[in-house]
Image: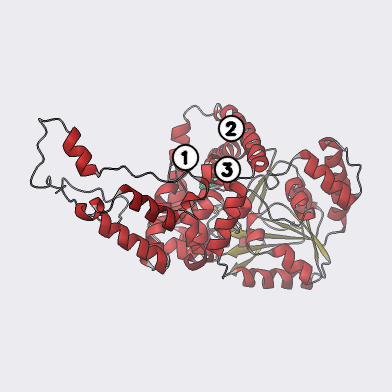
Amino acid sequence: MSTPASIFKQQAEKKAFDLEHRKRINFNIGKYKTKVIEGKEQFENLELARSRAAFIKRKVVENLDRYLIEWEANFKKNGGKIIWAQDAAEAQTEILAILKKHHVKSIVKSKSMVTEEVKLNDFLTTNGIQSIETDLGEYIQQLDGEPPYHIVTPAMHKSKEDIARLFHEKLGTPIDFTPEQLTQKAREVLRQKYVEAGAGITGANFLLADIGGVHVLENEGNARLSTAFPKVHIVITGIEKILPSVNDLSLFLPLLSTYGTGQKICNYNSVYTGPRKRNEQDGPDEMYVVLLDNGRSDLLEQVPQREALSCIRCGSCLNACPVYKNIGGHTYAKTYSGPIGAVITPFYNGFKNYGHLSYASSLCGNCTEVCPVNIDLHKYLLYNRQKYVAEGLPGRSENLVWYFWEKAMVNRKTMNRGNANLKNLAFSTVFGSTWGKRRSGMKFSGKSFNEEWMQKRPAEINIPSQPPKDKGVSADPPGPKFKVVTPD
Ligand code: SF4
């Protein structure tokens, strides 16, 4: 029977050896890396900026209840309406109720991973409401019937030829259209959609507690159009998106822009504080914010992994991850991919089905190094693995393998048993179809380690009869303890 873990392995294997895919991703990530170097030049002291941002976000995570209440009170003061949604189903139902109340037949939507999380497009379509993505990358993905590939650059895996072909098939444009012509075509199609839409739906990059504001950052101006034309604006966002003050934007906007796309600052930054007031000319008649939990409270309970709620969704850890770069975003099969996805998805969608994602890492620590808010991602992947094992989820066969491995490893006599041919045969029988599929077979030495050691050790080295005293084992991260055994 297929499980999410077995499907993940199959997809990962397929993608990892798709050389065309690898070429495209490396090309796009290469361009990103060059831009990020330029973006970082704006910081006089980048490490200080990262530490400050990390401190602010940790403070928010530790006091989330207090900040949410402050934000709620301030947003309500300005006439905004708030809906707390426990899970995806509740968010869907509430949004549908608002749209029905306002007789909305179509909506325009700016890029939002939370709407992906609650599968809003499919849900609205099933309920007879047209939902149009207005971010160009998201629009391309929607035309192709695919979810976003990356949390910042949704169509990163597509070449310009792929997109020209897609537009040719779906919109009837000439197959040799240039990227500029394709963009112009998308713009023409979308302009009409903004005018027709009864509601605009956006996500939020930050919720500003002191002013009850919703901050949206973008590069195309599509979020502004999505909120300027329609009479109703609905925001859907995770409860963790709080910043204590509007003043914090001076730190977070350059950080997010640089780590997200290599820009000094993104092109459009909007702060929404509620619906249009009586003396104002622009803005929606009604503004709603749906605050989504959907597993975030479970993550908040978890020390230390709760730190992952500090994420500002810059996508930098995805671009740095050797595993992501080889297996691609869709293999993770959930909204959030890469290292941050591997840390949070098991909490959002269950360890039973998604705990295996924590193993999709070489633990090289590159993700931690590039995170603008200093989240110890690779450490939390280890903690997740520990939880996965503690809950007995790896399965009987894996437990058996480790049982026998431990038995063999802690006993020198067992390790020395059997000749090299027997060991080679045993290894290729057990691991031939998995580990050995794309690697040459193991060749065990004809002599055991002990035999080699006894022959080659310098004469002056004495073998101690007692193991050295344990000088203390690092508790960080906690893991299985192994006994130290001296050679016989
Ligand atoms: S974990 Fe850090 S690097 Fe990864 S997306 Fe979040 S903020 Fe960016």
Residue at 62% x, 68% y: name it.
88
Disc 2 crowd, CA 10 A, few/some/many (<14, 14-19, 20+): some
Residue carrying label 1: 366
Residue 217 appears in the figure? yes
Q: Amino acid at mark 3?
A: Lys
Residue positioned 49% across, 45% down in the render: 439
Task: Assess whether mark 1 and mark 2 are in contact (beta carbons under 8 angstroms).
Answer: no
Amino acid type at image mark 2: Lys
Q: Quadrant of the N terminus?
A: bottom right
Residue labelled with disc 2 = 33
Seen from the viewer's position, the closer of residues 377 and 486 is: 486
Q: Is residue 308 toward the left or the right of residue 23 in the image?
A: left
- The residue that mark 3 highlights is 325
Q: Earlier in the sequence, mark 1 or mark 3?
A: 3
- Between 72 and 330, the one nearer to me in the picture: 330
| Residue at 84 percent of width and 50 percent of height | 190
The answer to whether residue 213 of the structure is visible from this angle is no
Left of 308 or right of it: where is 215? right
- Mark 1 lies on a secondary structure that is helix
Q: Residues within 10 Å of mark 1 (few under 14, many from 20)?
A: some
